[in-house]
Amino acid sequence: MCGRYRLSRPQRIVEQFDAELEDDFDPHYNIAPTQMVPAVRMDGAARVAASLRWGLVPWWANDMSIGARMINARSESVDTNRAFRDAFRRHRCLIPADGFYEWKKAGKERQPYNFSLKDDSLFAFAGIWDRWKSPAGAKIESCSILTTEANSLVVRIHDRMPVILPRRHYEAWLTTPEAQAEKLKELLVPLDPALMKSYPVSRLVNKPDNDGPECAQEISLQETGTLDLWG
């Protein structure tokens, strides 16, 4: 799964995704579910980065509380799961990030680890989005991150990982017609682990209120008294 991630350089969205900014985005180092996040989607023929709520609320939902349980969509069933299938066919997006976190149990504690690209560049999670209207008429646009089985780097910590799309697949993900959406499942695979790196980070990331650069800084497990999980 993917329950926390970061986007510390949102100013690079325009260049990396060839997208217009619908909103101004601040750097965040510890993005948590239900927060507003940038997502790149199509607006006519143009790519636009809009603010969406993380945790997809399907258009048919009775209330928006369901979104807290819909932060991730399994790629294996995204085309058949009632909560996600319409969004997969019609409303796909790219969710910019430059790192994500996963936790591994170490004794009585859970040690967080950072995962990112080796060059620390921006990348894109495969995402889907939907638009929900409350009984009072309020409109909520929300999104979910697709997940897949973990590659050989991430599997040391967790058995699932977010789908990270190579740049060459951005256009297909955003623009493939609904009738051909099934073909896109071929893209929903683990990223090559040779392109990634990982290291332990402070438990500051355990609390969403902590949102500074220190959340993403590498720490020494020996200094914290935690066993080296990579040995």
Image (cartoon, rainbow, N blue to C red):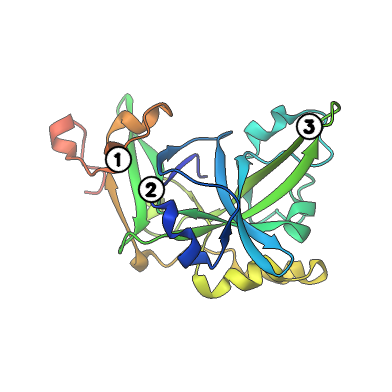
- Residue with the mark numbered 3: 138
Q: Which mark is residue 213?
A: 1
The disc, 1 or 2, on the residue closer to the chain's N-terminal end is 2
How far apart in space, not on screen, are marks 2 and 3 (Cα)?
30 Å
Contact flag, marks 1 and 2 (Cβ < 8 Å): yes
The disc, 2 or 3, on the residue closer to the chain's N-terminal end is 2
- Identity of the residue drawn at 68% across and 34% down: 67
Q: Amino acid at mark 2?
A: Ser
Contact flag, marks 2 and 3 (Cβ < 8 Å): no
Q: Amino acid at mark 1?
A: Pro
Q: Position of residue 168 (x, y in %)?
A: 53, 75
Tag count? 3
* Residue 94 higher or lower than 8, as above or below: below
Near-viewer residue (42 or 2)? 42
Q: Secondary structure at mark 1?
A: helix
How far apart in space, not on screen, are marks 1 and 3 (Cα)?
35 Å
Q: Position of residue 184 (x, y in %)?
A: 67, 68
Is residue 185 shown to the viewer in this render? no
- The answer to whether residue 5 is left or right of residue 175 is left
Near-viewer residue (148 or 115)? 115
Figure quadrant of residue 101? top left
How far apart in space, not on screen, are marks 1 and 2 (Cα)?
8 Å
Q: Secondary structure at mark 3?
A: loop
Q: Please name which of the two marks, 1 or 3, marks the residue nearer to the observer.
A: 3
Q: Residues within 10 Å of mark 3 (few under 14, many from 20)?
A: few
Q: Secondary structure at mark 2?
A: loop
Q: Position of residue 138 (x, y in %)?
A: 78, 32
- The answer to whether residue 34 is left or right of residue 152 is right
Q: Residues within 10 Å of mark 1 (few under 14, many from 20)?
A: few
- The answer to whether residue 62 is left or right of residue 11 is right
Kindly give the residue lying farthest to the bottom in the view shown.
168
